[in-house]
Image (spheres, rainbow, N blue to C red):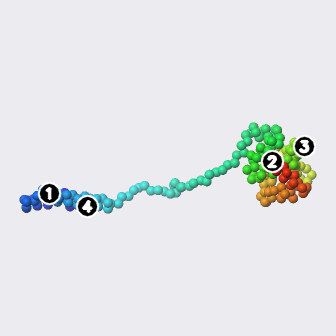
Amino acid sequence: MTFNNIFSKIKSLNNDNESVKIPVLFVITFIGLVALTAFTVAKANSKSYQTNITFVKEAYPLTVNKPKTEIVSGFSSDTINDLNQNPNSENIKNFMQAIAPEYGVNWKLVYAIGYHESGNYGSSLAQRNNNYFGRKANSSSYASWATPEDGIRNEFEYLKTKYFDRGLTTPASINVVYAEDMSWHVAVESVMNNL
């Protein structure tokens, strides 16, 4: 029904019967407007709208990266140079504490082995070969490293791969393979207990 239809209906009522009062005309007009509005709204709601916007999941993958943890030794090149030029027991201990997490080896164990094997890091083998741990290269000669840093790092790696990775993590369990003296572990444990 359109506005023209409503008005022509009202006009014909008015011409046929002069007694139709203004309030009746108002009610009829109001009902017509309500009907027309309802029809227009219903027609608008029945239309379906389409959009050209699409979400391409592959183009924008939603990923959450795991946080990365990086272990940094905290030694500057100057500190490393100082260790290599002046490998006293305090510099060696500080260096071992800093690098131990890289290898997963107890720094106290490594320090105690070095302390015991090198006579508090002062033996001629320690001074000459940077070999603080009494390690042999073969059955007749001792191993040698270019710097104290190299010797210490090698000991951490050696203990990790030859002992810790096999479950040998205590001086007593290491003793059988590491040293001929079966009381070696007692001396190493004594040093560890005093650190």
The residue at 91%/54% (across/down) is 139
**Residue on which disc 3 sits:** 124
**Residue on which disc 2 sits:** 195
Mark 3: amino acid: Ser
Of label 3 and label 4, which has the lower sequence position? 4
Tag 1 and tag 2, C-beta contact below 8 Å:
no
Nearer the observer: mark 3 or 2; the answer is: 2
**Residue on which disc 1 sits:** 23
Image check: 189 left or right of 17? right
Residue 36, image x, y percentages: 23, 59
Neighbor class of circle 2 (other Cα within 10 Å; few <14, some 14-19, many 20+) is few
Image check: 5 left or right of 167? left
Of label 3 and label 2, which has the lower sequence position? 3
Judge by depth and name the residue closer to the eye, 190 or 109.
Answer: 190
Judge by depth and name the residue closer to the eye, 127 or 167.
Answer: 167
Mark 4 secondary-structure assignment: helix
The residue at 85%/47% (across/down) is 115
Mark 1: amino acid: Pro
Neighbor class of circle 1 (other Cα within 10 Å; few <14, some 14-19, many 20+) is few
**Residue on which disc 4 sits:** 39
Nearer the observer: mark 3 or 1; the answer is: 1
Q: Quadrant of the N terminus?
A: bottom left
Quote the CA–CA distance across marks 1 and 2: 106 Å
The residue at 89%/53% (across/down) is 138
Mark 2: amino acid: Leu
